[in-house]
Every structure is written in structure tokens, then in C-alpha cells.
Image (cartoon, rainbow, N blue to C red):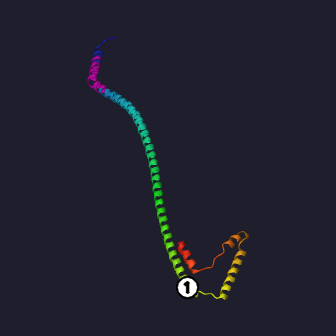
Amino acid sequence: MNINLTLIGQLLSFAVFVWFTMKFVWTPIMGALEERRKGIADGLAAGERGLHEQELAKDRAKDVLRDAKAQAVDIVAQAQKRAAEIVDESKGSARVEGERILTAAQAEIEQETNRAREQLRERVAELAVAGAKKSMSRPTRISSKNWRERSKARSWQQKLSLSLVPTRRRSLHAQSRPRAWSPGRLSSTFLSAW
């Protein structure tokens, strides 16, 4: 093989090409590759950091959720306790109100009873006075014929009432025979009772 000038020219042109490539082409390509490698490394590191932060966020979310559930349970328990207190207070106030109404009703009943007694006393007194006036306005002497008729009617009434009363009560009824009516006895009986 012959080393000639062509081979040397090719060698020189190849050396110039290598130098030019190293000087002007290789540096920007290597810079771009380095930036790309650095970006990929940063992305991977950020991804790892993101995964780590995601796990931390999940843990924090679980803690927050656990705390929220505990607070919700406490709030529900407090609400139930307060509701029970309100019900007890309502029962107590209703009981007090019922007792007050009952006392007022009893007082009103007592007043009505007293009023009715007073009216009854007044009416009995009026009737007694009217009966006394009526008996005083009648003649006091009763004729013997009238007396016999009254006593016959009274004996027939007693016989009739004895026949209507059962046999066990006849003895009691016979012992407690009604006395003759007189206006003085009626008014004194009613007035002493009241």
C-alpha cells in the first residue's frame, strides 16, 4: 500500500472535521444532553417527593378524619345529653304547672262550694222563715175531725211504708218512726245543722 497524498489529505480533513465537531457541535449537544439528564433526574426526585408527600397527606387525612369522627361522636353525645336535660326540665316545669293548675282548681272548687253553701243557707233560712210565717198564719187549733183524718192518713202511710220495706228492715223502720212535723222543729233543725 502506498501512502500518498490523498490519504494524507483525507487524514487532515478528518482531523479538521473532528476538531470542528468537538469545538462547535459536540459542546451544545453535550450541554443539551446534560440538561435533559438533569431534568429527568429532577423529575424523578420530584416524583419521589410527591409520592412521599402523598403518603404523608393520606396519613394527615386519616388523622383529620379520625379527629372529626371523634368530635362528631362528642357533639352527638352532648346533643343527646342536652336533649335529655331539656326533656327533664320540661317535665319538671310541666309538673310544677300542673300542680299550680290543680291548686288553683281546688281553690276555685272550694270557693264555689262555699258560695253554694252560703246560697243554700240563705235559701233554707228563707224557706224556714216562709214555713214559720205560713204555719203562724194558720189557726193553731185543729178540729177533732181533721185530727182523726190526719192520724188515719199517717197510720196508713206507716203501714204502707212498712209493707214496702223488706222484713229485715221493718224492725229498724219501726223504731225510727217519723215524728209529727212542726215549723219550729224544722227551722231549729235546719238552722242548727248549718
* Mark 1, secondary structure of its residue: helix
Q: How many marks?
A: 1
| Residue under label 1 | 136
Compared with 167, 21 (above or below) is above
- Tell me, yes or no, whether the highlighted magenta stretch contains residue 29: yes
> In the picture provided, is 150 more to the left or to the right than 69?
right
Of all residues, the one furthest to the top in this rendering is 1
Secondary structure mainly formed by the magenta segment:
helix
Camera-side residue of 1 and 169:
169
Name the image quarter holding residue 23: top left
Compared with 47, 106 (above or below) is below
| x 29%, y 13%: residue | 4
- Tell me, yes or no, whether the highlighted magenta stretch contains residue 144: no
Amino acid at dot 1: Met
Camera-side residue of 169 and 87:
169
| x 38%, y 30%: residue | 48
Report crowding for label 1: few under 14, some 14 to 19, many 20 or more residues within 10 A (C-alpha).
Answer: few
* Residue 11 point in image, percent of width and height: 29, 17
Compared with 22, 181 (above or below) is below
Camera-side residue of 3 and 89:
89
> In the picture provided, is 34 more to the left or to the right than 154?
left
* Residue 83 point in image, percent of width and height: 46, 50
- Numbered range of the magenta stretch: 11-30
* Residue 90 point in image, percent of width and height: 46, 55
